[in-house]
Image (cartoon, grey):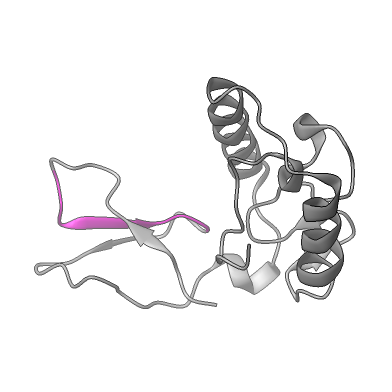
């Protein structure tokens, strides 16, 4: 899997950081995309601190937008047809972002239910 780089500090655009494994790279010229093997893919387990950070960010955004929820039909389709067959799905969690995904009706325990959230690799 490739790293997903972003610029964490706008004042220092010579440093990019991977969203998944937190690997940092320094570059002189910033091409739109930089490819590197993601350390996250070595063990396919996201760090607990990254899970907490992802969950907190998602929950804050969801609540700020009024806690919009996807319908049962949308959740069932995403879970059954996209998440369950995905190679990054394990048990009830996504191995990329670490979030729980299920058919639960609670947005607080199910990323799919949160209408403000999406797949880290844009499958939904």
Residue 119 lies, with reference to residue 34, above or below; the image says: above
| Residue in view at x 86 percent, y 57 percent | 76
Outermost residue, left side: 28
Residue 40: x, y in percent?
A: 58, 65
To which quarter of the image does residue 28 belong? bottom left
In the image, 48 versus 54, the foreground residue is 54
Residue 61 lies, with reference to residue 46, above or below; the image says: above
> How many discs appear?
0
Residue 96: x, y in percent?
A: 64, 60
| Residue in view at x 70 percent, y 51 percent | 98
Is 13 within the magenta?
Answer: yes
Q: Is residue 99 left or right of residue 77?
A: left
Residue 95: x, y in percent?
A: 71, 61
Quadrant of image for the N terminus: bottom right
| Residue in view at x 29 percent, y 73 percent | 33
Quadrant of image for the C terminus: bottom right
- Which range is magenta? 12-20
Residue 74: x, y in percent?
A: 77, 54
In the image, 118 versus 28, the foreground residue is 118
């Amino acid at each position: 899997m490739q790293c997903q780089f972003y610029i964490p500090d706008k004042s220092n655009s010579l440093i990019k950081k991977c969203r998944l494994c937190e690997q940092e790279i320094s570059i002189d010229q910033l091409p739109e995309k930089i490819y590197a093997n993601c350390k996250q893919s070595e063990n396919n387990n996201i760090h607990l601190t990254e899970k907490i950070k992802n969950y907190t960010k998602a929950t804050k955004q969801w609540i700020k937008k009024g806690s919009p929820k996807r319908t049962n039909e949308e959740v069932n389709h995403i879970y059954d047809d996209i998440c369950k067959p995905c190679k990054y799905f394990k048990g009830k969690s996504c191995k990329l972002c670490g979030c729980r995904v299920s058919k639960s009706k609670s947005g607080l325990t199910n990323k799919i239910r949160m209408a403000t959230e999406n797949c880290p690799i844009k499958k939904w």
